[in-house]
Image (tube, rainbow, N blue to C red):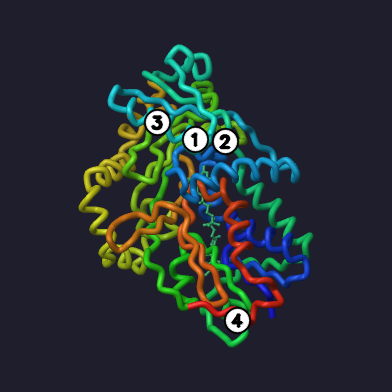
Amino acid sequence: MYDFAIIGGGIVGLATGAALGRRYPFARILLVEKEAGFAQHQTGRNSGVIHSGIYYKPGSLKAEMAQAGNQSLRAFCYEYGVPFDVCGKLIVATTPEEIPALEGIFDRSLKNGVPALRLRPEEVKEIEPHVACLAAIRVPTTGIVDYRQVCHALVHEMQQQGGELKLGTEILQVVPTPLGHLLETTWGSLETRFLINCAGLHSDRVARLGGMEPQAMIVPFRGEYFELTPQRRHLVRHLIYPVPNPAFPFLGVHFTRMMDGSIHAGPNAVLSFKREGYKKSDFSLRDFTEVMTYPGFWKLTSRYYQEGFQEMFRSWSKAAFTRSLQRLVPEIRAEDLIPSKSGVRAQALLRDGNMVDDFLVMEGTNSLHVCNAPSPAATASLEIAKRIVSKVPRPGRLSLVKRA
Ligand SMILES: Cc1cc2nc3c(=O)[nH]c(=O)nc-3n(C[C@H](O)[C@H](O)[C@H](O)COP(=O)(O)OP(=O)(O)OC[C@H]3O[C@@H](n4cnc5c(N)ncnc54)[C@H](O)[C@@H]3O)c2cc1C
């Protein structure tokens, strides 16, 4: 009988396991991951940015936790010897119409307490000589890290604390018991007093297995990247972002320097026909049917069909992708871009067609379910973990907990 079982070996699950081990050193903690390695999905396929928290609605969990997470993640990396680089980022307005939205982001920086500087085009040239813009904001606290390495450090910490980690173990059924839950896995049954669902792209399904009725469904949005050829990496020094469309939770295709020195361009945001579908041709009948029969998807589509088609077109047309990047760095040419690996975002969508904007953790009977942890959840992972630990009962009291 475990005290805590965590489902999902992405950064949120691993950070939660490590935080529980720190708080309750004598608890029996188990983490199960269906893949043969950790961080195989969103966490290992993201842009590697340590966000600052500048964009998010003041007072939201995203705003609060991205900013605190930026600090705590850097401190964790420093302690565990994980390389990171606080290189700062630029958000650039390239048309007069974007300037009010850029000003809006600057206002948010003040409200959220995120340091930011307004820059004129000639000042931008000193930082990024190949960028063309009308105005920009520099955010000095944004950084980069390889989140797979952060996960290695978290796995190491959990192991040091005596936590158990099982790879290649998928949770198939969750059966409530008087003392907690019985988990049916691909390797047999396990018992736990408390269950924590950090299953990312499958978090809604795991929540349903656990007897919850999440109000939102996970809709998978693939983010495709190109990489600059090594000869053209000099065109981008740090991180260059456009002014995002305020209607979307995605930031628009941008340039990111990765920890290995490569420069990634992307990600776009297209509906994926499979939850873990990293190729355009990937298709799952179950995943596709679920999305197509979900009223929320059609309400979203009726509102944003133009943007959706543009994203799909850009996904198939390298020329269109290149044009989006040329708005930021005009010297980029199609032949400078080579396809790179993609990621799929788990975005919770409500039945009314609205995307769940903030992080969402639902409480069940002897269980907690992380039902929406999109970007910047990697940045905020240590803070999300602290929040989860503050909500779980002390191990000795677990069997007494009952919630509606
Ligand atoms: C393209 C892209 C770019 C992004 N860029 C950034 C960025 O630059 N900065 C940032 O902060 N955030 C970024 N994000 C967001 C960030 O990567 C995610 O918010 C974060 O990784 C979520 O972590 P997670 O642990 O919740 O999910 P995941 O990493 O997806 O982990 C969930 C795990 O659960 C496992 N699992 C699922 N079902 C089961 C089951 N039944 N049994 C056992 N295991 C199961 C899965 O195999 C998986 O490993 C980006 C995301 C994407 C997709």
For label 1, count other residues whose C-alpha is less than 10 Å away and answer few (under 14), some (14-19) or many (20+): many
Contact between marks 2 and 4 (CB within 8 A): the answer is no
Q: Is residue 32 above or below residue 379?
A: below
Which amino acid, mark 2? Met
Instruction: Indicate which label's residue lies in the foreground, 2 or 4.
Output: 4
Q: Looking at numbered disc 3 in the image, what kind of residue is underneath it? A: Pro
Badge 2: few (under 14), some or many (20 or more) residues near its Cα, within 10 Å? many
Q: Which residue is mark 4?
A: 180
Q: Rounded to the nearest whole Å, what is the CA distance between mark 4 and mark 1?
A: 45 Å
Q: Report x, y in % for residue 48.
A: 56, 41
Compared with 329, 203 (above or below) is below
**Residue corresponding to mark 3:** 242
Task: Please indicate, yes or no, whether residue 379 appears anywhere in the rendered image.
Answer: yes
**Distance from Cα at disc 3 to Cα at disc 2:** 18 Å
Tag 4: amino acid: Gly
- Residue ID for mark 2: 258
Check residue 264 in the rendering and tell me which mark sits there, or answer none. 1
Q: Quadrant of the N terminus?
A: bottom right
Residue at horizontal 69 percent and vertical 38 percent from the top: 83
Are circles 1 and 2 on residues that touch, CB within 8 Å?
A: yes
